Amino acid sequence: MKTAVGSLSYCTNIHPGEKWGDHFEQLKKYIPAVKQQVSPDQSFGIGLRLANAASLELSKEENLTAFKQWLKETDTYVFTMNGFPYGGFHDTIVKGNVHAPDWTSADRVSYTIRLFRILAALLPEGMEGSISTNPLSYKFWCNRCAEETNAFVESATLNMLLVVEQLVRIHKSGGPIMHLDIEPEPDGMMENTDEFLDWYFNSLLPLGIPFIADKFQVSETEAASLIKQHIQLCYDVCHYALVYESPKDVLERMEQHGIRIGKLQISAALKANLPAQPAGRKEVIDAFRKFNEPVYLHQVIARKNDGTFIHYPDLPEALEDADNPAVTEWRSHFHVPVFLEDFGVLHSTQEDIRQVLALQKERPFTQHMEVETYTWDVLPPAYKQEMGSSISRELNWIKSQL
């Protein structure tokens, strides 16, 4: 829906369906009901997620035409897409494969360009479009010497520039402005502001400026401007809370460096202080065990009593080190409902969401806001509710914050 500070929706990666027909049935089931609960009197925006198989099917003219007609009939519109997970995201073990294929692969390039062509056909006139994507790759796939890592990053970046080229061509031919929004996350090739800015200014721009300048016969200054228009940041609140970065600091640094935030993904992580006393510590650890499920990655970043951090690639590794006396806090990558702040002895990073929405309300820094709680199927039973009402409750809570 359109708010005073931008479009707000939820990401449909919450719904199963790797084939378009299956996913479309889920949209038909839930979107009208959610719209009635949160946006009965105005158009409702959709944050669309398409698996590769679904994107191939929706690219067919008859399917795209039918979907556009359904959008018109239901007074809904698509303004953003999630291009991070390429393959199966439900009823399968996802874990690190959420990054596959990574940006060194031609399949990732083709998939992303296809998504942008679909988005260009769906966007309302005059509206920018955004697609979020993974931060090049999974760090554990690139644990090599510095020289090999640099070659890997260069290959991935050059592939991403092929997408930029297409976005520039689409806009120059009269199409909409669209941007690819890089989503840092724990154990991605970029997982924090330092790594994102390092890549942007030491890899993307040095490789991209001569590439775009040559392709379009423009100056280096204009080439840099085109890259900054079409490659932006996807600020996932959960991910940045996991790396202990405050919203105010992230936004200030992006502004200082002239990098736009293309999409705000509104999500919350789990966190808790770990008491020194054995009984209290065991209670907290046992509560985390209830969230140890086998489908998605639940990286843990632990704060030590000296202010440094330990990175665990998944919750089981953290649980094995639960008695580490130097650790005083855990934050775990588990997208919990944004409207809940407490989960018994555990808490969420909801305060980060409150802060970032207050900053958005004070001075809007993005036009695209998307709730991304995709874990309803794997939540502990005590926190599961009917999907439609849960989605509506999240969106209405965010509206109340704005």
Image: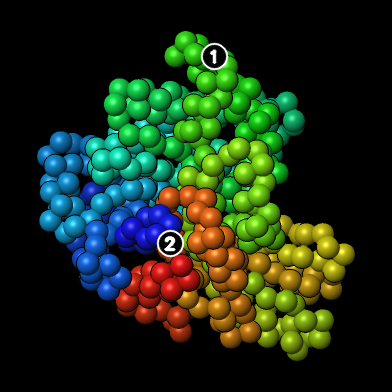
Residue at far right of view:
306
Comparing 182 with 222, the one in front is 222
Near mark 1 (Cα within 10 A), the count class, few <14, some 14-19 or many ≥20, is: some
Residue at x-position 33% and y-position 48%? 79
**Residue count near mark 2 (Cα–Cα under 10 Å), binned few <14, some 14–19, many ≥20:** many
Q: At 23% from the left edge and 49% from the top edge, which residue is drawn?
A: 20
Q: Position of residue 209 (x, y in %)?
A: 57, 20
Residue at label 2? 371
Q: Quadrant of the N terminus?
A: bottom left
Place of residue 194 in the rendered image (x, y in percent of width and height, measured from the top left)? 70, 44
Q: Where is residue 100 in the image (x, y as percent from the top left)?
A: 48, 42
Q: Earlier in the sequence, mark 2 or mark 1?
A: 1
Residue 134 visible at all: no
Q: Which mark is residue 219?
A: 1
| Residue nearest the viewer, comparing 104 with 370 | 370
Q: Is label 1 in a helix, a strand or a loop?
A: loop
